[in-house]
Amino acid sequence: MRFKDYNQNQTVLLPYSFDDLIPKQHPVRVIDQIVNSVNIQPLLKAYSKEGNPGYHPKMLLKVMLYSYMTNIYSSRKIELALRENINFMWLSSMTIVDHNTINRFRSDKLKESFKEIFKQVVLMLASEGLVTLKNIYTDGTKIEAQAGRYTFVWGNSIKTNKAKMLTQLEELWKYAQSIDNDDEPNPEPTEFKEISKEVIEKTVAKIDAKLSGNDKASSKAKAKLRYIKNNFVVNLEKYEQQEAILGERNSYSKTDTEATFMRMKEDHMQNGQLKPAYNAQISTENQIIVNYTMHQNPTDTKTLKPHLEDFEQTYGQEVFNELETITADAGYGSEENYDALEEKGITAYVKYNTFEKEQDKNYQKKHKAFSKENLYYNQEEDYYVCPMGQKMHKTHQSQKTTDAGYRQNLSHYRAQNCEGCPLRGQCFKAKGNRSIERNHNLERHKQKTRELLLSEIGIHKRKQRSADVEPVFAQLKHNNGFRRFSLKGIKKVELEFGLMAMAHNLRKKIAA
């Protein structure tokens, strides 16, 4: 048998060069070129001039980007790669960095400056013609937080527990008054509207005065009073601290207080249970992520305005003014969002919640005659006409505040006489005359959006949205296995998602 020469102890005249071992078109060379060309001055502000010299931030940034490009998210695994992987060795010039330093760089040093670096890379891609920053596609996905799955704190539970405390306090006070009626024929009225430390202390003092030394007082009532004395103020302080953490949310995790419990499409038990997560929003063009934001709210409706504000803040007014269109699904179709986009001069190809139903012929047939959306409206004289031809005049106007705090103006109309109408059973089933509530501003937006979405350009954009932004999430979550954050806190997870986004953009650049 003949084999090629194999001798591990063979010496060589000239040592091997890493540069000879890395192919010319390898991704590490692209990362090296990109990072060397960006301005890292914002990143340098995170370093102090005093103390021992630190590792060069450009080297650490290159290592971090290549780690996320190769689906290595653990700082310990990155340290191991710096010791064993020739590509990491070439990037770091054989520098071995421990995992604590890697984690500090990722979670602390990059936190304030990474968005600026991300912007520079996107503008670089724009200069190469890969994106224009004029037509974007927006969508969101929920990514699990690095937190315990069963460490719930619910806002509704806190409200319930505080209400129970108030009820127990009120019941004990009434009992204390009932056994002291001989001395006080007309019991002192006490209002128990809201639980507070002052209410607890004041009421406990009064109950204690009535129960102490009173032979009629039961041992059970005295035991309850002792429990209230020892626990109610402490529990109330705990609830108030939890409410302060909650803010406007309804839940959070004890192990990552900035994560909110959200219903996920995929989970380890495959039953759609709630898990602590963050709502990641991205805007893409040609499957390149041009902007990303992180939110604690599980619904997409409330995220569009802050997402666009972040886009404007990141790229500046001049670039933002060039933004022409935005395309998104029905999760973003609200009056507040339509108003905001109209104010900024952005054409909105954004579905409203009933748009898809309206395209269904069965839905149209069922709702064509009697739906309030299809009633004839005379704009000049401000009245509707019912299916029987009866005018429905405006009775009054009202205002409604949405969960997001947006105030809507509503107009109310009522028919004059529906008694004996042969279409009454099909038209409506309530008592009295039919009345309807209309939001004219929202109806104007829906009509405008309907025309845009059904136009030739709108149909193209609806198709393109499914092929532009949704595959990016598939790439990040399924192909790259990025389903759970490694860091905690909204600022840090936004940075981690940004690293993932930039790594994705660099992949697209290489593929182009």
Image: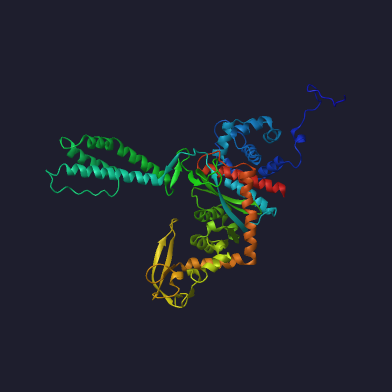
Taking the spot 49% from the left edge, 69% from the top edge, the residue there is: 371
Q: Residue at x 63, y 55 (%)?
A: 466
- On screen, 39 above or below 81? below
Q: Residue at x 71, y 46 (%)?
A: 510
Q: Is residue 290 left or right of residue 129?
A: left
Which quarter of the figure has residue 197?
A: top left
The quadrant holding residue 69 is: top right
Which residue reaches farthest top?
A: 9
**How many dots with numbers?**
0
Viewer-nearest residue: 53 or 373: 373
The answer to whether residue 61 is above or below residue 331 is above
Q: In what quadrant of the picture does the N terminus appear?
A: top right
| Residue 364 in the image, given as x and y percentages of width and height | 55, 67
| Image location of residue 23, percent across then percent down | 76, 39
Judge left or right: residue 467 versus residue 217: right
Figure coloring: rainbow
Closer-to-camera residue (64/50) = 64
Q: Would residue 333 be visible to someone looking at this image?
A: yes
Between 399 and 97, the residue placed more toward the observer is 399
Q: Could you tell me if residue 346 is visible in this image?
A: no
Q: Please tell me whether residue 170 is drawn above or below residue 458 in the rendered image.
A: above
Residue 57 image position (x, y, % from top left): 61, 38
Work out whether 381 lies above or below 3: below
The location of residue 16, given as percent across then percent down, is: 77, 30
Q: Residue placed at 68% from the left, 36% from the top?
A: 91
**As drawn, is 244 to the left or to the right of 279?**
left
